[in-house]
Image (cartoon, helix red, strand yellow):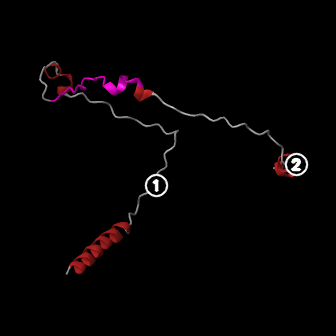
Amino acid sequence: MKARMKQLAALTIFSIIFLAGNVNAKGNKAITASSLETTVETTLEMESWMTNEAIWNTSNTEFVTVETDSQLEVEDWMINPESWEVTLEIVMEPESGLELENWMVNENNWKI
């Protein structure tokens, strides 16, 4: 029964995807926008609540909440010099001299 339900669900999902993928809209053309086109923006419309001083000059905190960060505290590990000591052994290996190889000076390798 469980396998039959899974098959039915898979068939339903496949059918929806198949049918949705085969939509053919006629009359629509792809419009390419260029940077040379000029767009006209609609004018802004002021509504009464936008200019109402009673809304903006209120102490009502129903819509505005101010979150404050918790007080920062210095913990012991932050000022303990032992926690900041780093013991690294830096080993300096001498570099070998640079050498020219044949491919570097071969004119055929550098022709384009």
Q: Is residue 96 left or right of residue 18?
A: right
Q: Identify residue for label 1.
A: 30
Above or below, comparing residue 74 to residue 108 in the picture: above
Give SS at disc 2: helix
Q: Is residue 65 left or right of residue 44?
A: left
State which tag comes first along the sequence, 2 or 1: 1
Percent x, y of residue 63 = 16, 30
Residue in the foreground of this view, choosing between 36 and 64: 64
For residue 26, what is the image quadrant?
bottom left
- Image quarter where the N terminus lies is bottom left
Q: Identify residue for label 2.
A: 107
Magenta stretch: residue 73 in it?
yes
Between the C-alphas of marks 2 and 1, the distance is: 52 Å
Percent x, y of residue 90 = 60, 34
Percent x, y of residue 34 = 51, 43
Residue in the foreground of this view, choosing between 83 and 4: 83
Residue at coordinates 49% horizontally, 49% vertically from top-left?
Answer: 32
Crowd class of label 2 (few under 14; some 14 to 19; many from 20; radius 10 Å): few
Residue in the foreground of this view, choosing between 45 and 53: 53
Which amino acid lies under the numbered mark 2 shown in the image of this protein?
Glu
Residue at coordinates 48% horizontally, 45% vertically from top-left?
Answer: 33
- Give the residues drawn in magenta, as a range: 63-81
Crowd class of label 1 (few under 14; some 14 to 19; many from 20; radius 10 Å): few
Magenta stretch: residue 70 in it?
yes
Percent x, y of residue 99 = 82, 42
- Judged by depth in the image, the label closer to the viewer, 2 or 1, is 2
Give SS at disc 1: loop
Above or below, comparing residue 59 to residue 14 in the picture: above
